[in-house]
Image: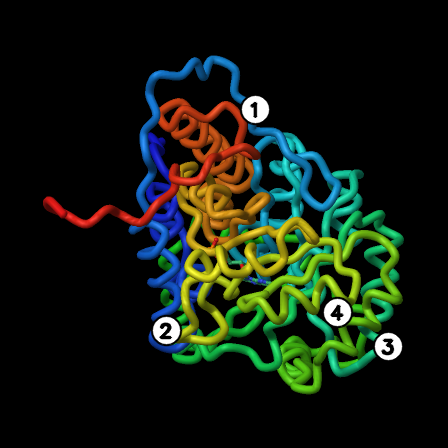
Amino acid sequence: MSKVASIFDLECLARERLPGVVFDYIHGGSEQQLTVQRNLDDMRALALRQHSLRDVSHRDTRVTMAGDPARIPLALGPTGLAGLTWANGECEAARAAVDFGVPFCLSTCSINSIEDVAEAINQPFWFQLYLMKDHKVNASLMRRAHDASCSALVLTIDLHTQGKRWADEKHGLAVPPRLTPANIMQMVGHPRWLANMAGSKRHTFGNFEHEIKEAGSIGSLSKWIEEQFDPAFDVNTARRVRATWQRKLILKGVMNPDDARTAIDIGADAIIVSNHGGRQLDGAPSSISVLPEIVDAVGDRIEVLFDGGIRTGGDIVKAIGLGAHACLSGRAWLYGLAARGCKGVTCALTLLEQELQDCMLLTGLDNLQRIEPGVVTAQPPLGRR
Ligand SMILES: Cc1cc2nc3c(=O)[nH]c(=O)nc-3n(C[C@H](O)[C@H](O)[C@H](O)COP(=O)(O)O)c2cc1C
């Protein structure tokens, strides 16, 4: 087995192991992928200032995220169809998260259902909700998340329509992947993936299987979900969710100070500054570039979480240095899952933790909640001023 030194190695292994239709789905973004690239570029463009004459033998990375303990300031964010990369992928990832000691968030559009994950880990987890036009389904999903002891509901607010991912359209991505001659060739060409998938408990959107009559046929279920994203979603809709869900509520997809202030008004417990990993509005700024103005707008009136472009432990320090309380990851853990299942997710978390520790040692930080201004900066201009 080849040595994995970074998340980028896991990405390479995922690319090798998965058929193109599945790899492109997890890796890509919407349209020209401008925002996917900005998330990565802007994160890399930030500089970390060394601070060397300090004793940093005791370092604390622990934090609570929406009330739940986390060994490092990172949760596994919601990613739809993770179970297409590894059999029972959401259960495997949730196990890795629990064993490591970070929160796991299940997507509405997962392959394993809420109940599958609850049974697999027997511990509270977070559930991400896409609000559907069908309010009965929304109410039922929230009830099921409540009964499964989910400690937080992550309400995604940036899905009035689904971003167009050109690669997925060309592949004819469906759940399970459509059997076009090209897709069949790709799947047959990836026998390890195919054999592993045969052991999957489910092969469609697990959370909807018993919710709607269209669930009988996989094609009609995918179509039903696509048509259910609601352009009328607004602050009143979010307020209704707040009134229904009594536990922690996190609004995900906040990209401007107005939405952040509204989240406070409606009584949300936390926000996630996120552009959906560049999978929704192509052309949106990177999430790291808008983080400081959102933090300035809300102060400490609400917990500010962050995602988008986290690939190293240093990236976590950068986000926290710019005011985030903690981060979520999407692709980093998905690459791990796609490469090696539960062990791959543990590997991703371990790498990020080691890099985080190294970054703290070299920047002179003993506690991430006390990063002084100036540790994370723009790259200083070259040459004498
Ligand atoms: C394959 C994939 C599927 C995703 N599915 C969901 C989803 O179902 N719900 C959601 O709120 N966000 C979803 N996201 C967005 C992530 O939660 C997160 O915002 C994003 O991946 C963060 O960027 P990163 O991948 O650079 O870490 C998805 C992202 C990816 C890569």
Q: Which residue is mark 4?
A: 208
**Nearer the observer, 349 or 222:** 349
Tell me: residue 297, above or below residue 49. below
Mark 1 or mark 4: whose residue is earlier in sequence? 1
- For image coordinates 47% across by 76% down, the residue present is 281
Q: Nearer the viewer, mark 1 or mark 4?
A: 1
Q: Pointer 4 and pointer 2: residues touching (CB < 8 Å)?
A: no
Distance in Å between CA atoms under marks 2 and 3: 38 Å
Counting residues from the N terminus, which is met first, the one under dot 3 or under dot 1? 1
Which residue position is annotated with label 1?
Answer: 60
Tell me the residue that label 3 is attached to. Answer: 136
Of pointers 2 and 3, the one earlier in the residue sequence: 3
**Eye-nearest disc, 4 or 2:** 4
For the residues labelled 4 and 2, the Cα–Cα distance comes to 28 Å
Front label number (1 vs 2): 1
Q: Find residue 269 and report its horizontal and vertical position in percent.
A: 74, 54
Q: Disc number at residue 182? A: 2
Task: Tell me if 381 is positioned left or right of 301 in this view.
Answer: left
Q: Position of residue 350 (x, y in %)?
A: 48, 30
Q: Is residue 110 visible?
A: yes
Where residue 261 appears, x then y in whole percent? 66, 66
